[in-house]
Image (cartoon, rainbow, N blue to C red):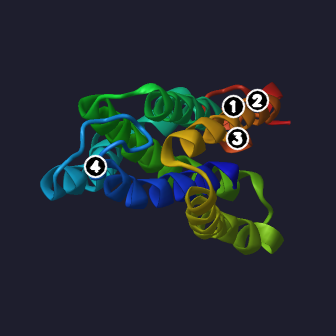
Amino acid sequence: SLGSFIGGISTAWTSVVGQDLQQPNNSMSIEPISDYEASWIVAFTPIGMMTTMLFLGSNMCELFGRKKTALIHAFINIVVWLMRYLTTDLNVLLIAQLLHGASDGIAALVIPLYITEISSDSIRGSLGSLYMFGIKSGYFAGFTLVAVAPIKLSAGYMIILPVALLVGLLLIPESPLYSIRNNRIDEAG
């Protein structure tokens, strides 16, 4: 799943950005940060994820549908990578980290749900494993990317993936189960 792959890359990027930002003349042109500030860069992601999953996640899937919720996930990722690429301010980066967590929280709910609802019993398990495969392969790709490209430049490259995700999501149908539950039988086809 491209959505979980993006989440994996984002997590890998997060794990190394603190080290980069502690250096004078770092690639993001942010004033060097302390260990304490670096820890908050990492901590803001799970805070955003937990908050979203507790208060918004499942409600979003039912209120907006699986497709629109996935589109929100993609849009948030575009915003996150743009913020990371364009910022020279630690506070903006921290907000991006909260949004990254929120996006991961949405993905953790909507991706497995959509896969379950569109797949037949015979392939559901295989398709379901794509979510975790996406995360782990995203980790690998993210660590590889930041090893060969500066942190800021890698953030610029990453804008491409959520844009591709957004375009791809525009092409898929809504979950048939969600359509039936909302009396849109003709869309459930």
Q: Which residue is mark 1?
A: 163
Instruction: Name the mark nearer the viewer: 2 or 3.
Output: 2
Quarter of the image with the N terminus is: bottom right
Mark 4 → mark 3, Cα distance in angstroms: 35 Å
Quarter of the image with the C terminus is: top right
Asked whether, in this view, residue 165 is left or right of residue 6, the answer is right
Q: Amino acid at mark 1?
A: Val
Asked whether, in this view, residue 70 is left or right of residue 60, the answer is right
Q: Amino acid at mark 3?
A: Ser
Q: Few, some or many C-alpha atoms within 10 Å of disc 3 (few <14, some 14-19, many ≥20)?
A: many
Q: Which residue is mark 4?
A: 41
Mark 4 or mark 3: which comes first in sequence? 4
User: Residue 175: which disc?
Assistant: 3
Foreground of the two, 147 or 62:
147
Mark 2 → mark 4, Cα distance in angstroms: 29 Å
Instruction: Name the mark nearer the viewer: 2 or 4.
Output: 4
Q: Is residue 102 above or below residue 6?
A: above
Mark 1 → mark 2, Cα distance in angstroms: 6 Å
Write the residue at 53% across / 36% down. Answer: 77
Write the residue at 39% across / 61% down. Answer: 15
Look at the numbered discs 2 and 3 and tell me whether their residues touch, using CB distance below 8 Å. no
Residue 42 screen position, x and y as percent:
29, 55
Mark 4 or mark 1: which comes first in sequence? 4
Residue 96 screen position, x and y as percent:
37, 35
Q: Amino acid at mark 2?
A: Val
Mark 4 → mark 1, Cα distance in angstroms: 24 Å
Write the residue at 42% across / 49% down. Answer: 105
Write the residue at 46% across / 42% down. Answer: 103
